[in-house]
Amino acid sequence: MTTATLTKDYYRFKPWNIGRAVIWSLFAIALIVAPMVFRSSLALTMLSQIGYLIIICLSYNMLLGQGGMLSFGHAVYTGMGSFIAIHTMNLAAKGSLPVPLLLIPLVGGLGGMFFAILFGYVTTKKSGTTFAMITLGVGELVASMALMFPTFFGGEGGITTNRVYGTPLLGLTFGPQIQVYYLIAVYCFICTALMFAFTGTPLGRILNAVRDNPERVEFIGYNTQRVRYFSFIIAGFFAGIGGGLAAINFEIVNAADSLNGIRSGGYLLFTFLGGATFFFGPIIGAVLLVFASILLSELSKAWLLYLGLVFLFMVMFAPGGVASLIMMNLRVAKFGRFKPFWALYAGLVVTGAVMVAGAAAIVEMIYHMQLNAALGPQLPFFGVMLDTSKPASWLISAALLVVGGVLMELVRRRFVLAWGHAQEFIEAEIKRREAA
Amino acid sequence: MTYALELKDLRKNFGKTEIIRGVQLAVNAGERIAIIGPNGAGKSTLFNLISGRLAPSSGEVLLNGQRIDGKRPYEINRLGLSRSFQITNIFPKLSVFENLRCGVLWSLGYKYTFLRFLSNLDDANERTEALIRQVGLERKRDVLAVNLTYAEQRALEIGVTIAGGANVILLDEPTAGMSKTETAHFIALIKHVTVGKTLLTVEHDMGVVFGLADKIAVVVYGEVIAFDTPAAVRANARVQEAYLGSSVADAQGGH
């Protein structure tokens, strides 16, 4: 066996990775087709935001998932990218700086990179908790400094721009939202591909090693500070591109909103929800971020509460995020053990829906009493009229919550059992195949 | 002549406590040295001083005639000295292959590059495959390091240590926690992978020590009290008194 593998051709042979080609083609097609399928202006707004947030969340995961760097200040690099981009656009519109709109995201990227070089030198000196604390400090510093330099940051009102300037390129003015979407989509695809490529380079792999065991990396010839610093700069570059696209999309940047810790926390939260352990996790995270901040916030005033609960349950039950849930189930399916889980998942969804309906009804009634009491005791809730003054509404909601909760717990126990069996089977199967 | 590794009056204090008290040691290229001594004698501290994990309080460490004391671990590694750890110290979420490839990259000059694909680095991949066979982990090539058995992790630890092609290898208790049969197998592995290299190893198992080493250095209370061939060390009265004949050695299973 050993002599066979000694021949050089063994690892020179690189088959064209069909699976990978299919996935990337699907990604490209999804980006192209999405606005044709979802035609409303709301959908287009959401798609545009998803596009640049994918870049931002992926760049954030370069730090969190690939490098083990828990940054609380990623918005600094997206935000600074936005500001540099918007000032460049204004200068270009005045005719003093000939930069076409197509290249504005790159300018934002260089801006983000510049500030990553500047601040990253300090933050990446340390790892772990100390790194997290320093990024938090730098983030707050930049956010508060922004209000001290109103000429650059525009003070409370922010900086505005007009993305339609210069001579149209091939008839593209980038005035209509659909053109902006496709600009974002192209950048999204290229940046995603580049960031994926990064995971296959020496620096990308050593970054994983630094995440796993920084001490040992020092003993195989690498300076861990350098590894973190260089990766941080690259992440800052992509963050800046995302920021530049955001500036083009909104034509306004506001320091109070785009640089602060809440924004950074959002990137962290949704990158985590999407799944930091897999490359594609943050893409899911970006989609969730837009759905939560646009749709959920329309639906309910209590959306941040729901979001917090989702985050809480995710950390407790699926710390690998949505991506790891998908991959774990795919693994079960790959070993042909998925069959019993159809019914179990259906059970979880139905009982879970009952429980959530009960809980949400109670939350909504409480919010209604606190915020909208003047509108009377009645509020609509998914086609039903709830009445905060009648005990029936409260009792039925509570009953749904309790019954749903109890049933869900019963299903969950059977699920855990079945899941354990499936995992045992898979482990045994892997051992068997190894031995064979 | 220059030695592969030379320690000159090396000292280390932790606060007021002097742990290493003027160690002198000169190792010729290609020699296998076992460092023995009772628990707390300062053997691991000595390794930490040599490999740059700790900076000495005074004294010199010379690698092939060049001062390396006070340098950072990665600088020392680049000069051709590599070490393993007593407690397994690998990259748990990377596969066996990736662990070893990480160890190979710097020595082949790839540094921090992000402009080339790992899959195209033929020399690195070839060397990694060869390493996998050397440490006998072919069947575990794509298994995450965290999922290996203890003995396999120890083998991987050795693999990562020798991956960069360093000429001076420091192994800190490579067989700690292994069964008798695993130990015998492992010593053969160590001998095999360190052919032509200078080897220093901390070891508790006397059977291993006398089977592996060309020379033995006996460290007691932060000093090298004897440095000679196994036979001479065995016959040395000071060593017998201070270490081999003591209850400590008996308790540690000297045989």
Image (cartoon, coloured by chain):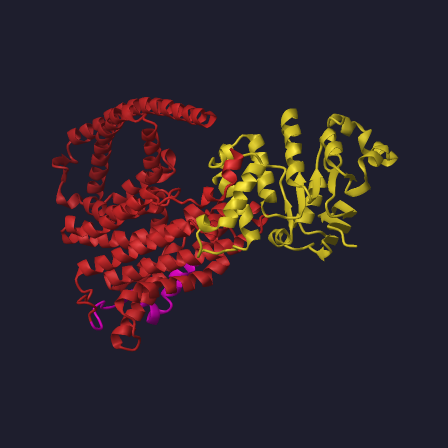
Q: Residue B198: give x, y in percent of width and height.
A: 70, 45
Which residue occupies 54% across, 38% down?
B132
Q: Is residue B125 above or below residue A408?
A: below
- The verdict on residue A139 being magenta is yes
Q: Which chain is yellow?
A: B
Q: Residue A217: give x, y in percent of width and height.
A: 55, 48
- The verdict on residue A153 being magenta is yes
> Going by the image, does A147 lie left or right of B10?
left
Q: Is residue B47 visible?
A: yes
Residue B71 falls in image quadrant:
bottom right
Q: Nearer the viewer, residue A400 or A333?
A: A333
Q: Is residue A38 visible?
A: no
Assign the C terminus of chain A to one quadrant of the image. Answer: top left
> Going by the image, does A164 lie left or right of B34?
left
Report the magenta residues as a range. A138-167
Q: Nearer the viewer, residue A205 or A144?
A: A205
Residue ranking furthest to the right: B237
Q: Residue A327: give x, y in percent of width and height.
A: 34, 36
> Going by the image, does A75 lie left or right of B76?
left
Colour chain A appears in: red
Residue ranking furthest to the bottom: A96
